[in-house]
Amino acid sequence: MCGICGYYSRKRISEDELRAMNDTMVHRGPDDSGTLFFPAGDGYTAGLAHRRLSIIDLSPLGHQPMCSADGRLAVVFNGEIYNYPELREELKDYPFRGSSDTEAILAAWLKWGEGALPHLNGMFAFALYDREEEKLFLVRDRIGKKPLYYWYDGEGIVFASELKPILACPGFEKKVRRDVLSRYLFQQYINAPDTIFEDVHKLDPGAVLVFDPAKAGPERVSVRKYWDLKEVYHRESSRLVRDYAEAKAGLKERLVKAVRERMIADVPLGSFLSGGYDSSLISAIAQSVSEKPLKTFSIGFEEKQFDEAGYAREVAKHLGTDHTEMYINEQQMFDLVDSIPKYFDEPFADSSQIPTMLVSMLARQRVTVALSGDGGDEFYCGYSIYENVRQAQLLDAAGAAAHLAGRLPLGRGKTLEDRYPFRVRVIAANRDPETKTQFGAGSYVDIAERFPLRREGEDWLPTGYPVESSYGVRDWQVRRMLLDMEYYLPGDILCKVDRASMKYSLETRCPILDRDVMEYSFRIPHSFKYRRGEKKAILKDIAYDYVPKQLLERPKTGFGVPLDKWLRGPLRQQLEDYSSRDYLVSQGLFDADYVSTFVENYLRTGDGGPATGANYSKMCWSFLVFQQWYGTYMRKN
């Protein structure tokens, strides 16, 4: 787990400037750093920089940037290649000098070129410069575990693991992308390929970008998918494993292999353990293949109605792990609010980032690598929304009829549909075939679209993702799961875990997101995942092989950050300042009259307008996080 950055351009960036860009990510790699420069044709120069968190091969032979033995290739790499021992055996003709997985990337690329990508199983983002072809390749892992940004100015390209190095790059002009604001406010994150800045993009998961200066204009940059979620789903689901016992055994075998591979490290390793199904399963498998007690970590809350640390403690006791827990209070969470813009360097408002930072801080006191259970909900039908989606599909025909009848005018601009109960109105209004599984409170969509200041002729991204027909799936549950895998998982969950853990220089590894596990999950019939109303059925069944059912089967409590209490309490003055009409007019991004009135109403009553009866703390939190980010990166001193 590291940080990478660099450039390929005619605009020479000095070693001091590149080093300064690189050092904005010292938290991602506190152990070592390096830079290399390569002159190319037509006045171009390639510069590569790396911040290292040493995990595999702690010796100087693991230093990056790393060059191939023949000097042709140079790479900077963030992540882990879990099948690197097998790759090194297959590529044994290559004169390996050290024992790192980075060197396996170089050897594989020399043999197969871009064809090396299907051979790599891991989480990774890397930049590889080919001195012979004078091309730069940027690559991101299949599901988007590792981040990779790039800025193309029409002539040269700058890349980085985070936005901070790009912001520090000489010549970069910070221009906020206005068209993403409504979507951000509604979704609370900005998904690839979009970012908060004009001309800056996130590389899509499963993609490779080729920068070739020999080509003209936009053709210098080409992006293609080497692993496409939709294609892989349809390929694998065409050969379902219809026998339950066989499917369970196949999934368990792949999970055990994935966990075992992720336990290879030259530094201390542990596991997050919340006491829920996913983290308990991963911790149980890790303990079963470990020769000594696995270090596990959980956080508890002093508010007893939210505290689940006792469940984690019971699971740890059953497994025999070396368990550490920390009880936190509201003040400890609140103290992290001001650090959000620094480590989430574009607006990101999923408030669960705060507990994630705290458990990462706890784990880093004893380990450098932690296993997590991310991906279980998306791939095995775990979220409560999936039950709602199933009900919505069953009621869709009735909703269409209700929508037609609801057009009946009642006077004063009102229709019969306006009088429907909330749940009926949601189903009736859900008529767009491209967003069928993304229904919800229309008022939140309306508000998100009203907040930004819109200029005539501007195009805006919709708040949702109008892509559902592209999945070619009739079952709404499966369709929504695929949507979450493509957008919510990399854009929110994995981004949150990456930034929160790297704040403390902690590497997180996700066995459920192993390539073979993900692809095999598509071969498992959906009825094995959602079975007679039970979500994540087959995954739970595997967990019961390790942990007694009574230790896991319980209603999930969860812990919500008290946003409303904070916003109307200790953050009130800050929210008032950021939403004042004068500030918004000078900022020029938001509708000053609408937003200032909305926030004033929220602070007074808890809702955004007269008699709405809705609590809009989530919307005001998204707005506040944006304004904190703006104050950190955009305001002129």
Image: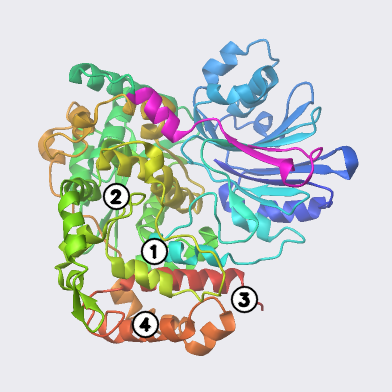
Q: Per the image, is 279 magenta?
A: no
Q: Which residues are magenta?
A: 209-237
- Can residue 331 be seen in the rendering of this structure? no
Q: Is residue 122 visible?
A: yes
Q: Which residue has dot 1 on it?
A: 186
Name the N-terminal-most of marks 4 and 1.
1
| 173 relative position to 407: left or right | right
Mark toward the viewer: 3 or 2: 2
Q: In the rendered image, which residue does mark 4 sit on?
A: 598
Instruction: Tell me the quarter of the image containing the N terminus.
Output: top right
* Nearest-to-viewer mark from 2 and 4: 2
Residue denoted by label 2: 437
Closest to the camera, between mark 1 and mark 3, is: 1
Give the residue at x 66% y 66%: 174
Horizontal side, residue 364 vs residue 59: left or right = left
* SS for callout 2: loop
Residue drawn at (19%, 20%) of the image: 244
In terms of sequence position, does the residue under pointer 2 or pointer 1 come before the other? 1
Cα separation, mark 4 vs mark 1, equals 15 Å
Is the residue marked by circle 4 packed among few (<14), some (14-19), or many (20+) residues within 10 Å?
A: many
Please state which amino acid type lies under the numbered disc 4.
Phe
Residue tagged 3? 635
Q: CA distance from mark 4 to mark 3?
A: 24 Å
Label 1: how many Cα within 10 Å (few below 14, some 14–19, many 20+): many
> What amino acid is found at the position of numbered circle 1 in the picture?
Phe
CA separation, marks 2 and 4? 28 Å
From the image, state whether disc 2 or disc 1 is nearer to you.
Answer: 2
Q: Sequence-wise, which precedes: disc 4 or disc 3? A: 4
